[in-house]
Image: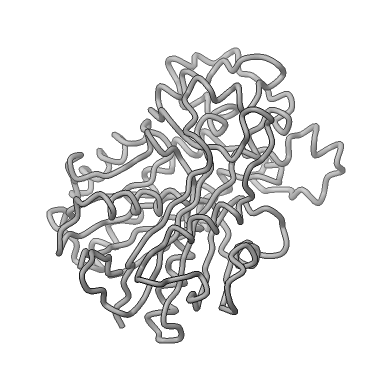
Amino acid sequence: MDVFITDLGAFLPNAPVSNEQMEEILGMVSQLPSRTRRIILRNNRISNRHYAIDPATGRTTHSNAQLTAEAIRQLHPYDGFTPADIECLACGTSSPDQTKPGHASMVHGELASAPCEVVSTAGVCVAGMTALKYAWLNVASGLVGNAVATGSELSSTYMRAALCGDLPTRDDVDLEAQPILAFEADFLRWMLSDGAGAAFLTSQRPTGRRALKIDWIELVSFAHQFETCMYSGALKNADGSLTGWREFTPEESARQHIMHVKQDVKLLNSEIIPTSVDRTLPKLIDKYSLRPEQITWFLPHYSSDFFRPQIYDHLKDIGFEIPYERWFSNLPTKGNTGSASIYIILEELLHSGRLKQGDRLLLFVPESGRFTISYAMLTVV
């Protein structure tokens, strides 16, 4: 059964935050200005992002569940639609407001809508794609008539100076020459931001409006091959294993920054692009008989413009070169919102008026948690 995304919604909290405002809102670690902020921002080329933080008081303005509910309220798939019409709610995030209950249950509670099926998907950036795939398969099987899938992040709570404690600095590193090494302590503070996106899925072919038919969604994990790269709530040991937060006293957890989001920089730099492109895409090219000229729009989610030319070069190396003029990203203006990013990218493109019937969209979402890669194909109808 064909399944269509008939509308997308996005919600970005509060006013855009410029590069110069970031440290004022997040706070300075150890009361010292970041040595790496300008270098990282120059490489990621993000100019604005959004935080669920009141700049005047420093208080949180929205929970993750509230961000997600607001994105769902932006959906208008047909006249008279309300959240009470949702039959299945699939919500993905890497930053839920609590460990229990599940994120989707909290979103459902915020909507105060009607009884429906709910499912929460965890992970990092691909959590939004797993939610989308669950919603797609549920509708395609005929088990439900419609579904809403979401991706959302409340990343700012991890990045405030109060939570970071006294992060180590790398005075021995030439950050200008090797900007990726700055990621280790400071990269994610200047990369991640808050937001939510939502998609309405139905088997009813739309009339009188552009929609996106889901052709396929693929998810591929390489956890059998690689140790953890991006993590939170754990300590990474010398042998590559993780010790979870429950093994630490509150004092130990604070001293070792257990709840801070961290990244294994060497592993990220050496493996994320080869794994995302070289090890994943050729199998999908064979499976679906893909050719680069078939792709009208390439929608990549990447955390930093630093990786953009690397993705292009690796696509070219495997014989799947897609010219930059067919790429669509809003990273500079909307920031890196993790699992919400692909929804926010899609929402902007769908409502831009640039899509034509028959256009084919290739979505690309990698995550470095333990290297899970997602690709999807959509066709404009």
Quadrant the C terminus occupies: bottom left
Numbered label tally: 0
Closer to us: 113 or 343? 113
User: Can you give x and y, in whole percent of width and height, for residue 288 in the image?
Assistant: 23, 68
Q: Quadrant of residue 315?
A: top left
The spot of residue 173 in percent (x, y) is: 54, 16
Position of 331 compared to 297: left or right?
right
- Give percent across and percent down for residue 262: 61, 37
Question: How is the rendered protein coloured?
Answer: one colour
Q: Quadrant of residue 218?
A: bottom left
Q: Nearer the viewer, residue 183 or 356?
A: 356
> Residue 126 in the image: x percent, y percent?
47, 56
Nearer to the camera, 69 or 3: 69
Q: Residue at x 74, y 27 (%)?
A: 165
Task: Say which residue appears at 27% left-offset and 42% top-offset.
Answer: 314
| Image: 321 above or below 173 | below
**Left of 362 or right of it: where is 196?**
right
Q: Residue furthest bottom?
A: 142
User: Looking at this rendering, what residue extends furthest in the left direction?
Assistant: 293
Residue under the image location 66 percent in, 43 percent down? 239
